Each structure stands twice: as structure tokens, then as C-alpha cells.
Amino acid sequence: MTTATTPADTDPAGTALGVEFGSTRIKAVLIDSTGAVLADGGFTWENELVDGVWTYSIDAVIAGLQAAYADLAGQYRERYGVPLSEVGGIGISGMMHGYLPLDDNGELLTAFRTWRNTFTQDSSRTLSELFGLNIPQRWSISHLHHAITHGEEHVARIAHLTTLAGYVHYRLTGRHILGVGEASGVFPIGPDGHSFDADMLAAFDRLVQVPWRLADILPEIALAGQDAGRLTPEGARLLDPTGTLQPGARLCPPEGDAGTGMVATNSVHPRTGNVSAGTSAFAMIVLEQPLRSLVEQIDLVATPSGAPVAMAHANNCTSDLNAWVEVFSQFADAIGRPIQRGPLFDILLGAAAKGNMDEAGVLSYNFLSGDAIVSLPEGRPLTLRQPGIRFTLAGLMRSHLFAAFASMAYGLKILKQNADAPIDSMFAHGGIFKTPEIPQRVLAAAFDTPVSVGQAAAEGGAWGMALLAGFLLWGDGMQLADYLEQRIFADLEVITIAPTPEEVAEYDRYLERFVTALPLERTATEVF
């Protein structure tokens, strides 16, 4: 991936727009047919805990969409001297899972319940036993079952059930549709790889008493490269209230952040894997054959083309690390030596490169919320240190960096114990990898496999979503894997780090302590 200095043909219609609703940032990226970035924009937001539910308001969703697009469009006009009056294709991505039930008029029936909520554990357990597959707490079907079994008033009025990406796509096109990767986090995909599992749909209908069939409220499913609608006049005004953007752009199927992460790291071939690290973290392994078994720590999802994927998903990754960086930023301000966040991250994570955890005497837990992968219904960020051992900046930051990947690494160990899931290559992306080497080296040690980071590491899913929109426009009948390999990533520069045996052993010992001491974390949630 490169940043273009001039549009390929000076025609904004020859562009593809990707927008991703991340947990802390909404990002928009505009590319040309080579994948080069023409302009980008962003909007920072945060989830809210309202009445015990992690949520984002729909007003914030729309305001953030418009702000990110306006930022991008302004950059485009400034850079190229012409307004962004049209785009060729659009793709919408968002945090997977969660719960957005809509009525006949497309109105939301409850506050948006995000993936972060962990109050659906009873429904998760019931459905996992019913289907014989792991149905995580954050999946949309777990939230729906929870609403049904708790007698929530709105259930009888549900006409459509969707995700954040699906909702925004609906507002832009009027179509209720999801890409298969996103759909695989709503309800299990069947053996055909492109539709919801019919036997499981029937089993769910037999389990509950509701005035609708599940198949009737779930979205249509589409594969990468298939048409998923056109930008309507209402959708164009929603995206760009100035009226500059014209309707008519083609939209690809909306995808989740897992799918866009796979695309952004060229990890859609079998035996490839990728890691997306942000507020949450997940490792995705594209399987050679579907895995149809119940492993509590592993989600079974799909690539945007429908290939089977095993996912180890951790609800918590960098949030507590970011909070500690914020404390150091406040200290720098207090002594009159303010420092920008990027250099501050480099300094603090650079300190984590020194020493080792066996000598540091520090153990950190990064659980801002609960995490099903280690069976925690709630979380409390926690740092412990042993007396008699010198407390250092290196040890503190190394413990937080090790903790950021620990739950995910635990899930991957469980996968390897229960399934044949070979990995030929592992790519990583996310803002933490803007700091070179040390986060990548720790991740490689955690997974005991070489990890690669490319130019797109910090661009992440918005670029991946733009590539999917570009695949719709310029795929020319190719398979997605071939399109990415030949058209986008052929000349991409990547940096690969292989862990040493000593680094792997050090991380293994840390992870063992991390898991063994989890009762401390559970006690903390009971008393504080």
C-alpha cells in the first residue's frame, strides 16, 4: 500500500471508499484501483456504560460517519483541487456482533448492545449445547436469546436483526444484507459456506416462543465481490449533508472488523493467519477444513469469501495500556514537558524491550471488561508486583505489553490442543504496531510463530474495507485471494520477526502465571 500523490485518472468515480466503525475511532479511507490511499479521515469516539449496557448512541454513529467522511472529503479537495462529488464503490465495516433489532420502519428497538457486553453467558451456554458449536456471549444470536428469555417487550416487534455495519449499510442503501464474514458472527454459517445453517435455524425456532421465524428476521448473506446495493439519494445526504456527494455508488457487502483485518493483511488463504490488536484483539486462522466442534475459547467464523476460520477473540487488549500511557502524559504535562502521544508510546514501549519478566516481578491484568476467553464475567485492570524486587519502568511496561496479548495467546494454545490448524504465515495490524519491533516481537513470542507487519499495519480495517469495495469494482471475476495477491500486495514491503526460543519460553512462563493467578482478578470484581 502507498499513498497516492495524484488520483490515477483524476476521476473521483474511479475510487473506492471504505469506512470502519472501530471501538475508539471511525476511519474512512479512499483508494484508487491499485489500493493506493488518496485521502483519509477519522473521528474519535468512545463507548458508554448506560444502565449496565456497553453502547454507542445511534446519533453518535451518524455524527461520526459524517465527520469521518467530511474529514476525508476535505483532504481530497485540498490535495487534488476538486470536490469529491462521487465515488465508484463504498464498503461499510464495524465492530462485529452485538445487537441491533429493528422494527418494520427500520427504527431501533433498543439501545445498541455492543460486543463488549458479557451478560449473555447463560444464553451462550444454552445455544452452544443446542448447536454443538461454541456460540460466544457477544454473538448477535446470544443477545437475541437473552432478550427473549428475559421477556423483553420489544422482542415481538422485531422485523430485522443486524449489526453495526449492517445498520449503516441499510441507512445508505435500504437493503438488509451482510457479508458472510460479518454474518458468521450473527449466527452459524452452514456447511455450504454462504448461508445460515438451516438445521440450527430450525432448532432455535423450536427452542423459543416468538411470533416470527428466525430466518425471516436475519439479513441476506452475500460473498465478497457480489453487489449489495446502490447509494440512494437519502443515503448520499446522510453520508454527506453538504449535498456534494451524488447517489449511485455501488456498495459491497458490509463486513466486520475481523474480515477487514484478514483482507488488510492478505490473510484469506488457508493456513494464513492475522492478528488485529486494538481495544479488543483477535487472532484469525484460515482453516483447510471446517472445524465443527465445541471448543469454548474458539469462535468459528468465515472469511469474506466464505472460507472457514478459527478465531481466538479477547475482549481486552490495549485499553489499559493506553490508560497507563495517559498517566505518563499527564505527568509530562505536570512537569511542564508535554510530549505527543506517538513519541510517548515509542518511549514507553521501547522501555519494555529491556529486561525480562522473570526478573521484573510484575504481573498485569488488562481486563477493563469481562472476557469470555478466560471465563471472566467482569473485569478490573490490575497490576501486582513482588516485594523485594526493584520496580522499574521496563518491568511495568513489559508486563502491560505481555498482558495485552495474553488472553488471545491462551485461546490460540487451546486451539492448537484441540484441532489441526497449521499456520504458514501470521500478519498483524493495529495502532500498537506503529511503534516498531517491540510489540511485534512480543506477539511473535506469545504465538511462537513469525509475525509480519506491513505498510498497512496502522491503516487497518478501513483500508481493508476499501479493498473489498475495490474488489467489487475491479475484481474482473478473480478470486479474492488472487486479487489481493496479484493486484494489491505483490510489491508490499513487510517486516517479519521470528521469536527466539528464549523469548518464547519467557512468554510461556508469564502466560502460565497469568492464567494461574486469575482467581485474583475474579476476587477483585467481587470486592472492588
Image (spheres, rainbow, N blue to C red):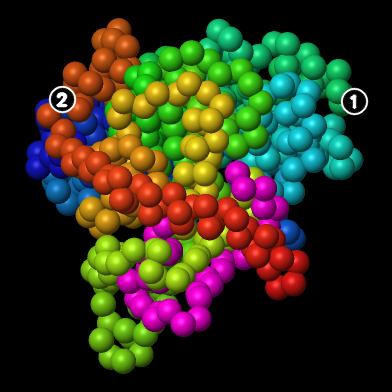
Q: Total label count?
A: 2
Please name the residue shown 56% across and 66% down the image.
Answer: 381
Circle 1 sits on which residue?
Answer: 209
Quarter location, residue 4: top left
Question: Which amino acid type is marked by label 2?
Answer: Ala
Residue 294 lies in magenta, yes or no? no
Q: Residue at x 47, y 44 (%)?
A: 409
Using the image as rendered, state which of residue 282 and residue 419 is in the foreground.
Answer: 419
In the image, is 26 to the left or to the right of 385?
left
Visible residue check, residue 143: yes
Q: Position of residue 84 (x, y in %)?
A: 26, 40
Q: What residue do we see at 44% from left, 37% from top?
A: 283
Furthest residue to the bottom? 335
Vertical order, 289 against 281 (above or below): above
Residue beneath the point at 52% across and 48% down: 407
Amino acid of disc 1: Gln
Q: In this view, does 468 lie to the left or right of 221?
A: left
The x, y position of residue 288, in whole percent, is: 43, 15
Quadrant where the image shows the C terminus:
bottom right
Name the spot of residue 233 as percent of width and height, x first: 45, 31
Q: Tell me the magenta residue range.
A: 373-402
| Coordinates of residue 338 in the picture (x, y in percent) | 27, 82
The vertical placement of 400 against 220, above or below, is: below
Give the residue at mark 2: 490
**280 and 362: which is toward the camera:** 362
Q: How far apart are marks 1 and 2 (CA)?
A: 53 Å
- When asked about the image quadrant of residue 33, the answer is top left
Q: Earlier in the sequence, mark 1 or mark 2?
A: 1
Label 2's element? Answer: loop
